[in-house]
Amino acid sequence: MLFTTDNSLDKILHGLFEPYAKRVTDVKKTTAAMIKNGLINDQTDIINDHVAFRTLGVPHLGIASLERIFLHYGYIKQEHYYFNEKKLDAFWYKPPAEKYPRVFISELKVDMLSDDTQSIISKYTKEVKHDPIDDIDLNDPNAVIDFLHQHIWPLPTWEDYYHILAESEYGAWVIYNRYYLNHYTISVHALPAPFNNLAAFNDLLKSIWVIINNAGGEIKSSADGLLRQSSTVSQALTAVFKDGDKYEISGSYVEFAERAILPQYAHLPKDKIEGLHRRDGFEVSSADKIFESTFQNQALRKK
């Protein structure tokens, strides 16, 4: 995760990570444990597998809008994923160089929700009259960073937030958090043995009282067994709503990924292994459960 300060994409990723790391205490806690155990020297040694964003599928917003930032910086759109139960679409984006993280953008299919919930979401998002990306100088990293942290639509009331939450916890997360960085992901396979194994790494996390999302099991594995993922449960956020009410809601979290070497490259010496030799992409069944890191039944385990 070592970026140069004179590159615009580096600045954007750094500008996203800094406030996220301050808000999600498990970031600092995990990094400190990795340093203490000799896995890294500092945060910049961590390889970031991917970052993720959540959006709402309504006019002028959603994937078609947000992806423009990353396409502008050389990311290449890859596979589409659909999550039936959660009513989500998603795509992932291949970075312009191996040092950069993949990007994963998902979108709530708002038109599949109840009329009441659609109406509440529309009450806020109808304020967006055109694609907000049109108003940004995409060549200005500070403008991009500011956009990803600004109020694109008005703050919801607690009553409206809670109504959305009852039908779509994902939708409630987005209506309050907007485009805030949902998570970053530590590439566990890049760490020294034995912690380059996700089970061993999870044991390290549990030894420092980091709570692991156990939806579908602590380790979510792809059908081919070559991609294994886990995540923390979301950090509690004291949210101030439009009507002045304050409640603790789900914020962001940290993910961990172990990408195995593809069978056709198993013969290569370890010092010759690069990112292209490992399992790429994502897995619907695994990502489906990772989404639940912000769900109440997981987040409340942190209390």
Image (cartoon, rainbow, N blue to C red):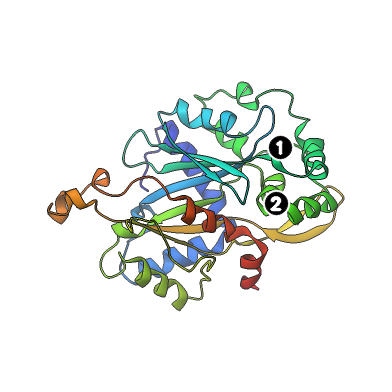
Of residues 6 and 201, the one nearer the viewer is 201
Residue at the far right: name it: 243
The alpha-carbon separation of the residues under discs 1 and 2 comes to: 12 Å
Label 2 sits on what residue type?
Ser
Of residues 82 and 192, the one nearer the viewer is 82
The residue that appears at 39% across and 33% down in the rendered structure is 6
Query: Looking at the image, is mark 1 or mark 2 earlier in the sequence?
Result: 1
Q: Do the residues under discs 1 and 2 have CB atoms within 8 angstroms?
A: no
Image quadrant assignment for residue 78? top left
Q: Position of residue 275 (x, y in %)?
A: 27, 46
Q: Position of residue 84 (x, y in %)?
A: 59, 48
Label 1 sits on what residue type?
Asp
Q: Nearer the viewer, mark 1 or mark 2?
A: 1
Secondary element at tag 1: helix
Of residues 139 and 189, the one nearer the viewer is 189
Q: Position of residue 83 (x, y in %)?
A: 56, 47
Q: Does 134 sit left or right of 49 as displayed? A: right
Q: Position of residue 7 (x, y in %)?
A: 40, 32
Give the labeled residue for mark 2: 168
Mark number for residue 125? Answer: none
The number of callouts visible is: 2
The residue that appears at 64% across and 60% down in the rendered structure is 295
Vertical side of 115 occupied by 31: above or below: below
Q: Residues within 10 Å of mark 2 (few under 14, many from 20)?
A: some
Give the labeled residue for mark 1: 111
Q: Does 125 sit left or right of 145 as displayed? A: right
Image quadrant assignment for residue 293? bottom right
Secondary element at tag 2: loop
